[in-house]
Amino acid sequence: MAAAAATALTRKQSFAELYRPVLQDPGDLLAVRGDGRKVTLKSAAIKELAASMRGRVLLAKSEGYEEARRVLNPTIDRHPALIAQPGSTAEVQAAVAFARANGLLTAVKCGGHSFSGQSTCDGGIMIDLSGLRGVRVDPATKRAIVAGGSLLGQVDGATQPHDLVTPLGTVSHTGVGGLTTGGGFGRVARRFGLALDNVTAVEVVTADGKLLRANKDENEDLFWGVRGGGGNFGIVASFEFRLHPMPRKVLGGDMLFPISKARDVLSFYGEYSAEAPDDLYLDVFMGIPPGGGEGFIGLQSCYSGPERGAAAAYEPFKRLGTPMTDRVRAINYVDLQRSGDTTDPRAMGTYVKSGFNSLVSADLITAIMTGFQGHQARMTQVFIPQCGGAINRVPTTATAFAHRYAKQSLMVMVAWKAGDDSTPHMAWARRYWATLEPFTKGFYPNEVADETADVIDANYRENHQRLVTIKNKYDPTNLFRLNANVRPIARG
């Protein structure tokens, strides 16, 4: 049967072509360039792009377009002129070549977690990597090869059966690409470093459509730049991660306290997080639900070290007395990584301001408590995830990530019902953040919101000039600009 079917194909056909979704004649399409000017995409060129891919090319009227254009923050309502969904590295190259040839405003979507919506755009092209997923683990060499569109839960799911791990985030539907190229904090980063510290090689589709392998020996400048420089230099089609031995069971979960204990909990966190062992990850979170109901403050922890050290790591928590809720227990690491998936407030309209800090001082605690308040239509939250440990022991210039001094990351988030006017909520967050920002130094590039270009430049600190040099080499026209953008030097 198979042989008969094969002989029935014409010389110009293949199985790939037979199963490729057919793009009907789209007609000429008005689109937007990266510089904001309009450009007309010819029907023949769009069809040629679609013919080069087994993945789909979606237009506004295509089935699947509405779902594909969305990101997690539903207040981001943008409409790309077309969406390319490559299913292979070669198809990523084709999509980038098309974007470059037409000078298109180009967005790259992996998990869609960008708070500010930079993984989508109006009028340009979205390159959606959801078809480029997969993880291959080599237990012998303790390495994982991860396709660029993969989600962190897929990596955890593939590595943990071998009692191996690499540090990746805290919400399992986060995209590996954006998380890793920007930094990559997580529950075991204090033991093993940032996600980007565990990358041993990458394959990158650069703005000229070339596929380059980069590691400490090949294209070393590109390898340095993608580890902290975000998506500025191209699309990472695959990552090679170093893996670390770690049992599947960890000790972790939440302890919740009434908001009346907020000052005590923040003081405890400030003291203990500064001296906690690297095996323990700790963060504090406080919130007031919409309507101004009863607030809460909580501590989330993950102890992943030797069992003999667990009791000592948790002994200081007794200073806080009995919590309202205590969910700390022995749990599979994969399950702990999934525990925040459905409560992640980014399913609502959200706005975030954040910054790194090195001390939870009494003055900072007072500022947090003074400005923290509920509102009838908004959820108000403050997070202080822990950094430190192995993250701090990497030199500032070893990778493009420049914030090795950070002990914590302070974050203010407001969330509101999708469809409501965002203006008053965002204005409140900015006012509140203005009272907290003096306690911070720099911010996480993955949480860029509405900062100016000069502020973003300064945030790369002493690594900025080297990043500009790499940008000039690999993306001189700034095709990849929807990120914490490193602007190339204009050439005459």
Image: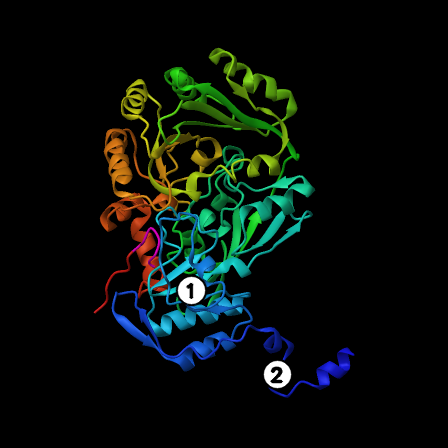
Instruction: Report the residue marked by disc 2.
Output: 13
Query: Measuring 31% from the left and 18% from the top, which residue is drawn there?
Result: 362
Residue pushed farthest left?
492
Give the mark nearer the N terminus: 1 vs 2: 2
The foreground one among 8 and 204 is 8
Is residue 407 something one can see in this rendering? Answer: no
Q: Which mark is residue 39?
A: none
Query: Measuring 63% from the left and 30% from the top, which residue is drawn there?
Result: 331
Q: Which residues are magenta?
A: 481-486
In the displayed structure, 490 sits above or below 451; it is below
Query: Measuring 25% from the left and 65% from the top, which residue is drawn there?
Result: 36
Instruction: Report the residue marked by disc 1.
Output: 206
Residue 460 inside the magenta-drawn segment:
no
x and y percentages locating residue 436 in the rendered image? 27, 29
Calculate the distance from the C-alpha at mark 1 to the C-alpha at mark 2: 30 Å
What main secondary structure does the magenta stretch of the protein show? Answer: loop
